[in-house]
Amino acid sequence: MSKAKLKVREPLTDTQLLMTITICIFIVMYGLAMLIFGGGFLRTQQIFDILNDNASLIIVSCGLTIVMIGGGIDISVGAVTSLVVMSCVMFYNRTGNMVLAALLAIGIGLAFGLIQGALISFLDIQPFIVTLAGMFFARGMTTILSVNPQKLPTETMDKLAGIKIEIPWLGYVANNGNVIPARMEIGVVVALLVVIAVFVLLQFGSLGRNFYAIGGNQTSALMLGINVKKTRFMSYVICGLLSGISGFVFMMHTGAGNATNAAGMEMNAIASSIIGGTLLTGGVGNVIGTFFGTLTLKTISKIVVTSGLNDPWWQSITTGGMLCFFILLQSIVLGRRAKKKK
């Protein structure tokens, strides 16, 4: 009689461990919010509201996660999103064609991704410098297009507001006895599709594995025959493309463009990626963690507002404190794992 072989469970990778920690913290935090504050936190619509308001941030964060896994950084994503919003609003007001407006958004995002990616990858210019210049350029172009806020026509905004997916079984019963279904904007569907697509790319695509390789150790990646320059270039192209899509989703949500659109989005995207387990040093990260990092970041903001701290600086303080907490947590966890391996 042959002895059955015991299967040894493989330990979680750094990426999986940090992602799991983020998901667990989000679940515990949201559960505590439900117990302490009740109200809106007891309704599923609260989650959908967070997703509706931050679909564009989720998309941008996915792009930035790819760049950060590859060991780079892109601080122009918020400004590119703002430029796309303003351009698409003004273009639609003149042509009335939403399909062409979407193509314009993708074109602008790709243009920034191609140019910045080429400068960083093939000319070896520091990513921070290139994307800083890109940020200033995009903000300046947004102001040149129009100093005054631009809005979509009222009838178009009404149509966009009406494009929502209703989920009755996740709704709630109002005080008058009517069932209010949970509502999800079409931008959330786009964001979820982007998350799934990026997840598949990173986990199962050769390009995704190359991102991890060059972010983990560029020298080893070169020895393995990976084209480091081309791989890094592709990370910025994808990030630019997602910035364009994010701008179009942002426009669908707000229906307006101005010079301050998406202000600070790049910092929120970096924070979401870090909270989700992506390391600034590269080689570690997961887009599912980034998704929950965004939810965690914005749930904290909801909790702060519900607590009665409506002043904007309280949200900045809590975001900063939360970011420091997760960076410290990552350092401790990965440090202990490194000691155990030794």
Image (tube, grey):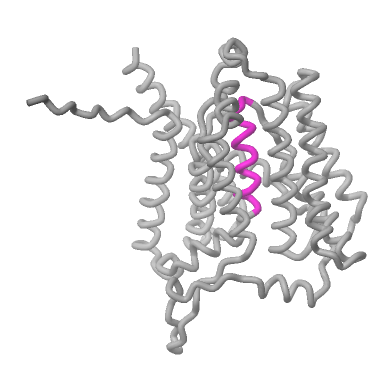
Q: Residue furthest bottom?
A: 176
The stretch drawn in magenta includes residue 45: no
Which residue occupies the foreground of this view, 335 or 164? Answer: 164
Q: Quadrant of the N terminus?
A: top left
Indicate left or right for 129 with 317 as reference. Answer: right
Q: Name the residue: 40% across, 26% down.
A: 332
Q: Name the residue: 51% across, 37% down.
A: 286
The stretch drawn in magenta includes residue 67: yes
Indicate left or right for 305 with 135 as reference. Answer: left
Q: Quadrant of the C terminus?
A: top left
Q: Name the residue: 60% across, 53% down.
A: 191
Which residue occupies the foreground of this view, 181 or 130? Answer: 181
Residue 138 placement: quadrant: top right
Q: From which residue to which does the magenta span run?
A: 56-71
Q: Position of residue 137 (x, y in %)?
A: 85, 39
Indicate left or right for 45 with 92 as reference. Answer: left
206 above or below 292? above
90 above or below 40? above
Which residue occupies the foreground of this view, 5 or 142? Answer: 5
